[in-house]
Image (tube, rainbow, N blue to C red):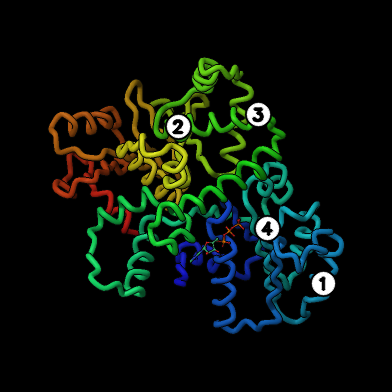
Amino acid sequence: MIRIDRKEYLDFLLKSKDKQIIKVVSGVRRCGKSTLFEIYKDFLLENGVAKNQIISINFEDMDYEELTDYKKLYEYIKSKMIGDKKNYIFLDEIQHVDKFEKVVDSLFIKENTDLYIAGSNAYFMSSELATLLSGRYIELKMLPLSFKEYYQAKLEYEKMEQKENRISKTLIQYYNEYIVNSSFPYTLQLDSDLKNIHEYLSGIYNSVLLKDIIARLKISDVMRLESVVKYIFDNIGNLTSLSKIGNTLTSMGRKTDVKTIKKYIRGLTDSLLVHEVSRYNIKGKEFLSTLSKYYVTDLGLRQMILGNRNIDMGHILKNVIYLELLRRKGNVYVGQFDKNEIDFVVINSNEIEYYQVALTVLDENTLKRELDAFKNIKDNYPKYLITLDDVMVNTDYDGIKVVNALEWLLGE
Ligand SMILES: Nc1ncnc2c1ncn2[C@@H]1O[C@H](COP(=O)(O)OP(=O)(O)OP(=O)(O)O)[C@@H](O)[C@H]1O
């Protein structure tokens, strides 16, 4: 089995190593949080940290079941700590420990600890917890594999298997595979066998739905929740109003009010299966609270739920670009300038970047339409038009740079 090194995430942990701050790793189930901890621990061991300086507990492991009592947990950790050196403490799936923040708080104030905690988002980084830990943590929001990670790992797998008569694939073929298969790391071992991949994805989907959403929000009408999931999956990249979802469900014979839709969507976004992207008024420089767009964490899962009937390559490309912007920059919004919409605006401190995404702009009218989206924005911040075309790329139209999506995805 190949271990994908998740370099960006590893760098994030390394940068904050030994700093007096709690490292929190959150992310959808099975995106690779525990494996990242394993990779990081190996790095520590290879770089002068002794084995007894590492205390590691995974609360989904039966061996540690007793330690889900927070007092016992604290006593256990204290008994393992060594006095004269740094103790690297890893608490994985910590949401299983009731009142775990008390333990985290007590360990945090000790000078010889470096604390790492991970959990699936739904329970774990609830707003109450974020408040409890406020000012004392940094969060790494992990996602499944990016296209670059997928592509590089896939090349390695194929090299390792040394398949005879292997037909070398083009980059676009890998991309097409990436958006249909899955970005969950384990699925790479399933050799693009869609039946097996869907079986694996069903397991993730069911446990997120049942454990993270239905149980937590005490939802009794599972079919209604699944209808909302389908609606959101079907409408990635479309401006979506809660009342429209409600009306659609009601017209299907499932009378549903806006409050219920709001609760279900909150469940979906908390579990990180779905991301909500709100709008930013570029002209008025204000964030808008109505009409958001939604994108999914894993396109393979979307494909499994919707079936083949809904291959919408333009919106799928926007979804891939959105996730990559989230990875690289954080703070991604849908831009609005009067009636014009910009697919993505990235806002960090006072730095802004604008992105428009289109499958192809080879047709003159399409190119004009896409460029026109920028026409009212008179500032000098970077503006990009990302497309799958491989001609015309790196052309500059009045400050708007046309970029090839795959080249961009494989870049830094
Ligand atoms: N970096 C990686 N390289 C190769 N395979 C990986 C990597 N990360 C994860 N995997 C595969 O995906 C599976 C799930 O990963 P992992 O248990 O680390 O996820 P997780 O986010 O901790 O999941 P959960 O929240 O459900 O506990 C692993 O068993 C492994 O097969």
From the image, state whether disc 3 or disc 4 is nearer to you. 3
Q: Residue at x 36, y 48 (%)?
A: 179
Q: Residues within 10 Å of mark 4 (few under 14, many from 20)?
A: many
Q: Residue at x 59, y 27 (%)?
A: 224
Q: If you read the primary sequence from the N terminus, does the residue marked by circle 2 or circle 4 appear first?
A: 4
Q: If you read the primary sequence from the N terminus, does the residue marked by circle 2 or circle 1 appear first?
A: 1
From the image, state whether disc 2 or disc 3 is nearer to you. 3
Disc marking residue 221: 3
**Residue 59 image offset from top left, x and y in percent:** 72, 61
- Determine contact: label 1, label 3, CB under 8 Å: no
Task: Using the image, determine if residue 97 lies above or below residue 229.
Answer: below
**Residue 357 image offset from top left, x and y in percent:** 30, 39
- Determine contact: label 3, label 4, CB under 8 Å: no
Disc marking residue 78: 1
Q: CA distance from mark 3 to mark 4?
A: 28 Å
Q: Is mark 4 within 8 Å of ligand 1?
A: yes
Label 2 residue SS: strand
